[in-house]
Amino acid sequence: MKVELYLNQKKQVFDVLPGEYLLDTLRRYDILSVKRGCEQTSCGVCSVLLDSDMIPSCSVLTVRLQGRHITTVEGIEEEATKIAFYFGQEGADQCGFCNPAMALAVYSLKRKNPHATDQEIKEYLVGNLCRCTGYQSQHLAIKRYLEDPS
Amino acid sequence: MKVASVKHSSVDGLGLMLGRPAYTADLMAKNSLIVKVLRSPHAFAKIVSIDTSNAQQMTGVECILTAKDFKRFAYTRAGQGYPEPSPHDKFVFDEYVRYVGDEVCAVACVDEATALEALKAIKVEYQVLEPVLDFEAAINHSSIIHPEPEIHEMFPIGFEPKKNIAASYQMHVGDVEKTLTSSDVVVDEVFYTHAQAHSMMEPHSVNTRLDYMNRLVMYSSTQTPFHVRRILSQVLTFPLSKIRVIKPRVGGGFGGKQAIHGEIICSAVTLITKKPATLTYTRKEVFESSYSRHPMRLSIKLGATKEGVLKAIDCHILSDTGAYGEHALTVFMVAGSKVLPLYNKVDSVRFHGEVVYTNHTPAGAFRGYGAIQGNFALESAIDILCKKLDVDPIEFRMKNMIKEGETSPIFSIMGEGTEGTAMNMDTCKLPFCVQKGKELIDWTKTYPNKSVSQDIKEGVGMAIAMQGSGIPYIDMGAATIKLNDDGFFNLLVGATEIGQGSDTVLSQIAAEALETDLSNVIVYSSDSDLTPFDPGAYASSTTYVSGNAVYLAALSMKKRLITEAALALRCEEELIRYDGIGFTNTNTNEQITLKQLSNRLFYNHDQKQLMITESYVGHKSPPPFMAGFVRVQVDTSTGEVRVVDYVSVVDCGTTINPMLARGQVEGAIIQGIGMTLYEEATYSSQGRLHQNDFLSYHIPTRKELPHLTTVFADSYEESGPYGAKSVGEIGIDTPPAAIANAIYNACGIRLTTLPFTPEKVLQAIHSLKEKLR
């Protein structure tokens, strides 16, 4: 069946199977920044923006998204480049598997709560697991990105 | 130094954050068959029959693989050098299944839905056997987990499968019984560690295809691409020359991707169907059907004089390797070889024990690799001893621990499943690490504890640790440097970047030696057709072993460039001065830039391709050292333990990239804290692993993040590239003992079984209260 949605601001028609999750649709259409980590909504590497909210794409059926806006990291390349700069400055990128979804989450946090406190940053990103960094370097990088006025 | 020992952002961070296709699953062929494995629901059973007829008839089922499709060949998945110190006790498919999640057979279908339906349509009749689920009762159990006659050891490792023993070992220096008898104070304690799961974010993934040369081309999320190629060739009797293994970007490994996982099954599908195929583990499979950390029972006795001189260490370990003996002996030995030398002034040491088979998920390589288990036992026992002696645990360590210039007999006795390599500690900044850590945690103001509120007690604790840097005389790493026109270089390494930053660090070493910018070195790693050999990312070897190979290759390239510059500038080589940008004939002041020289070599005069390969094999394994200091708060009403601060002071020689080195330590500390407090692996009475997803298996989130302070000692290891030792594993070793010691200092309870869940803490607090009543 056909579903029409806005992927990174561009209207696109997707041919999907009835029980297909958004994660599978996106990867089938070569949006490979969206990673498969657990398929149980608990690791965060498949997260995308649905309108303005972060959702795990492994938990939403694509057929339910008719007309909605989906943003992946491909749609925020300029901001993600800035985030990558701060991550690089703090040594906060290791295996990188969680990073595209992390960039989206951090971008979305800045839009919703640009002056987020330490605690609020941790709360907002708690679903974005990372097994490599120990989080502290990421936390410092995220703070510096939030403080970046550009 | 200009490039090495300087903070540099990683060379790949931007592209990965932008989501560019990089990982194995991103690189599968479009129309790949989906491979799924039918897994055992029983902990131990004999397969009576497999009926695949219904599945065979389903539309979209292309291939079903059972034991009949493979030559019967015993191998090990461990992913080590050859011959492996792990028993060859695994068949691709066998007539027995030995743990819940073990492989029964596999299907390859046009899509995932069909594959899952096909698995359901396969009827397997099992004869359920009595499983061995208590590793302390495994030896001489009535159930023999590996009765098959073909399995074998490659050299003596104490392999006695009829007794359920995968490996055993014993060594001693001096007469430990005698020393203990004559000691003023003796400690005798037993510790238990559990099966931590690696929990890397990227699940194990592999895809295969036949290329236009009719060769098997594989992408695999492996830490050991060259070992994968060798083992695959042996198991499938398929020529090594017709296999190309490419390791693309890997999304974390921590040892979990050292072994073979889906590679053989996926390759067999492609070889039989001639079609591309892919196999990616589900998260449940990653938990249940890859492998985890070896659970151990560590019985330790210490003897000391009343003046606080440690005289004897006696350690017996029983290790649970689960259903297969991957890394059975070597993880067990590291629990001694990279722990016991910390206290090198003892009169006698004994280290012995057995590694047993059980019907649990297999255990295998995991960051720390036995050292974290051994460290937990020894460094907890040292604090217990100090309490008995009524001496300060820091003073005790300062007096008894290994120091620079010293050695330990353990180094020559214990190696990688064989004898070891004698060495002196040319760099050991442990005294600095301990002093600095003590200062940074503000030890004196808290030790042993202070009260935060009526319920919350705060305490500090510490532990020291060591690791190694590669496996000397066994593991060889190589690097190739190629000059291009326009004067930039390709660095080709077999070394396996899995997120630890090796592509960046190795590029920095090359750039430093070539006196050029990092942007002039284009790194490409781990492709069995295109890069030179490397054993892979394990044993804390990449910076030291592969880094030395890169260093040697870069120096050779520089030498060749000077030879060519002398030809171009018509002078003796000795007269050439090189400054990274160009060459000067110091007699005539005539100059040629590197760019001009390389263009000359490609297009104009003396044409040739400069490409140089060097290799390195370690003659020793210089240990990095560290002191870990922790501040914890124990809520005595709920049993919750919270880590407030963790201070790591590390001697890893030169940090080639101080920022990435810090990242290695911080990441490892949090994994160690996870193992100590949050991550628990338990089994049902039928042998099913309870925790098989991130909801039930709790790895630390950023909410549990304590304040981390990481400091590096000023240290220069002469044998390492630009003075570097390793830093990948050392960080994980101290948290279990340091936290156990801090909890004791906070509220007087001594925890000896990991993890320290609130239940265990509360129970211990209640027992203590009962005792004091």
Image: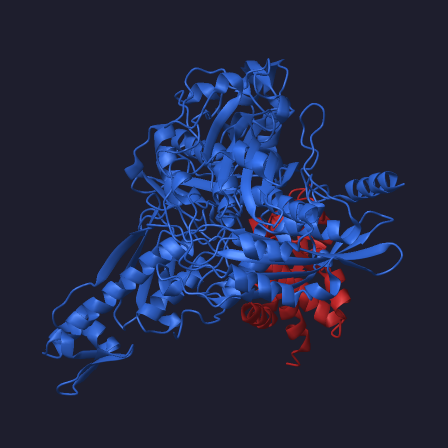
Chain ID for red? A
Residue B543, position as x, y percentages in the image: 41, 57
Residue B463, position as x, y percentages in the image: 61, 53
User: Compared with residue B544, is residue B69 higher up or lower down, i.e. above or below?
Assistant: above
* Residue B36 in view here: yes
For the C terminus of chain A, the quadrant is bottom right
Q: Which of these two is toward me, B661 or B239? A: B661
User: Compared with residue B348, is residue B637 higher up or lower down, i.e. above or below?
Assistant: below
User: Compared with residue B346, is residue B239 higher up or lower down, i.e. above or below?
Assistant: above
Chain ID for blue? B
> Is residue B495 left or right of A114 when viewed as pictured?
left
State the residue at coordinates (53%, 46%): B368
State the residue at coordinates (42%, 26%): B88
User: Compared with residue A83, is residue A131 higher up or lower down, i.e. above or below?
Assistant: above
* Residue A2 in view here: no
State the residue at coordinates (46%, 26%): B92
> Is residue B405 left or right of A7 when viewed as pictured?
left
Q: How many marks?
A: 0
Q: Which of these two is toward me, B18 or B489? A: B489
Residue B571, position as x, y percentages in the image: 10, 78
For the N terminus of chain A, the quadrant is top right
Residue B220, position as x, y percentages in the image: 45, 44
As drawn, the residue found furthest toward the bottom would be B589
